[in-house]
């Protein structure tokens, strides 16, 4: 009954938790992330938030990191572990009274476990509207092959 | 292996969640910094995935509404493997006070950071009073 009442809104973490709860209720066990968490996973609300999607040819990792200079990002990949680290600094204004300071400021690092068949030599990254998009190609041999019947 | 019924239910649930997200019921409140100086108030919000076209910034009376549709560039045949962000909308609202001059709001969106500056009405800013001598 009180879920939508604004007075109980305690910021982004509470939002994520509520959303996650609702999502888990709806989807239950039918999607992978509702089950066991990856051992390298971080608590929800960590900056930057990450989404991962895949096609048979490539895996794309989206990092929600607005207000960055992409040149300061350090992206590296070791086998199937993608590591992205950097810094997002929010300069506090002098002579100003702050009422809210919710945006993350500081150094961050996220390590993402990708499917085993990714090819660490095929990595591309771009930064659009505050999202860092890292695309890693998958090894060709892992793709399902059609078998011709003579 | 999911049964046909389970898959249909999942499709319906996905559609239902998508509709709720569209209606803003599952909107995320973006992290916001708010600070005040002598001549105005500034608000900075993290809204990654929002471009100018998808931003809805409105003042209605004394309420400031910030809304942004999140779009993550996805390709065909993409399948989600993991998601921290599962909503398609950022939204937050603020009640503004009367000394703010809502006619002259300035906003800037760069790399997913929205910066909104609301000046104070000129006549209500703190003013030095010149004292004449003699």
Image (tube, coloured by chain):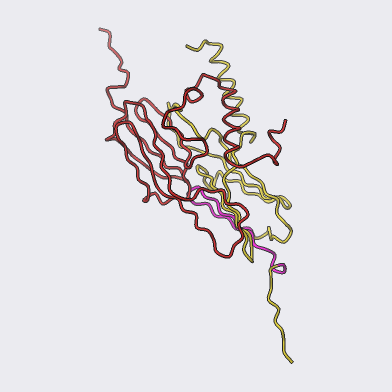
Chain colours: A red, B yellow
Write down the quadrant of residue A146 in the picture: top left
Is residue A33 rendered to the left or right of residue B43? left
**Coordinates of residue A31 in the picture (x, y in percent):** 49, 22
Q: Residue at x 68, y 59 (%)?
A: B103
- Read off the magenta span: B105-124
Picture layout, residue A148 above or below residue B118: above
Q: Is residue B13 magenta?
A: no
Name the one closer to the observer, A59 or A113.
Answer: A113
How many numbered badges does the structure rendering display?
0
Name the one closer to the observer, A39 or B131.
Answer: A39
Picture layout, residue A142 above or below residue A150: below
**Coordinates of residue B55 in the picture (x, y in percent):** 57, 46
Write down the quadrant of residue B17 in the picture: top right
Q: Quadrant of the C terminus of chain B?
A: bottom right
**What secondary structure characterizes most of the magenta part?**
strand
**Coordinates of residue B133 in the picture (x, y in percent):** 72, 89
Picture layout, residue A108 above or below residue A144: below
Q: Is residue B115 magenta?
A: yes
**Coordinates of residue B64 in the picture (x, y in percent):** 67, 50
Name the one closer to the observer, B47 or A55.
Answer: B47
- Farthest bottom residue? B134
Q: Residue at x 46, y 29 (%)?
A: B82
């Amino acid at each position: 009954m009180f879920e939508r009442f604004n007075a109980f809104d305690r910021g982004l973490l509470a939002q994520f938790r509520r959303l996650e709860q609702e999502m888990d209720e709806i989807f239950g066990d039918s999607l992978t992330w509702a089950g066991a968490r990856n051992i390298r996973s971080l608590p929800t609300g960590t900056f930057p938030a990450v989404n991962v999607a895949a096609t048979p040819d490539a895996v794309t990792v989206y990092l929600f990191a607005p207000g960055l200079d992409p040149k300061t990002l350090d992206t590296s990949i070791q086998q199937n572990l993608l590591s992205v680290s950097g810094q997002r600094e929010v300069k506090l204004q002098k002579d100003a009274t702050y009422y809210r300071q919710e945006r993350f400021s500081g150094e961050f690092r996220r390590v993402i476990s990708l499917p085993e068949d990714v090819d660490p030599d095929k990595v591309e990254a771009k930064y659009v509207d505050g999202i860092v998009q890292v695309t890693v190609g998958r090894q060709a041999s892992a793709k399902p092959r059609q078998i011709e019947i003579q | 292996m999911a049964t046909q019924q389970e898959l249909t239910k999942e499709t319906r649930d996905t559609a239902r969640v998508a509709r709720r997200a569209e209606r803003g019921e599952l909107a995320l409140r973006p992290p916001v910094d708010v600070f005040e100086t002598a001549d105005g108030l500034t608000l900075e919000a993290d809204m990654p995935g929002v471009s100018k076209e998808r931003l809805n910034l409105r003042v209605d009376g004394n309420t400031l509404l910030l809304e942004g549709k999140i779009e993550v560039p996805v390709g065909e045949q993409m399948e989600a493997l993991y998601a921290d962000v599962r909503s398609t909308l950022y939204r937050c609202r603020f009640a503004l006070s009367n000394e703010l001059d809502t006619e002259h709001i300035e906003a800037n969106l760069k790399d997913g950071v929205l910066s909104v500056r609301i000046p104070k009405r000129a006549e209500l800013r703190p003013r030095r009073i010149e004292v004449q001598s003699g």
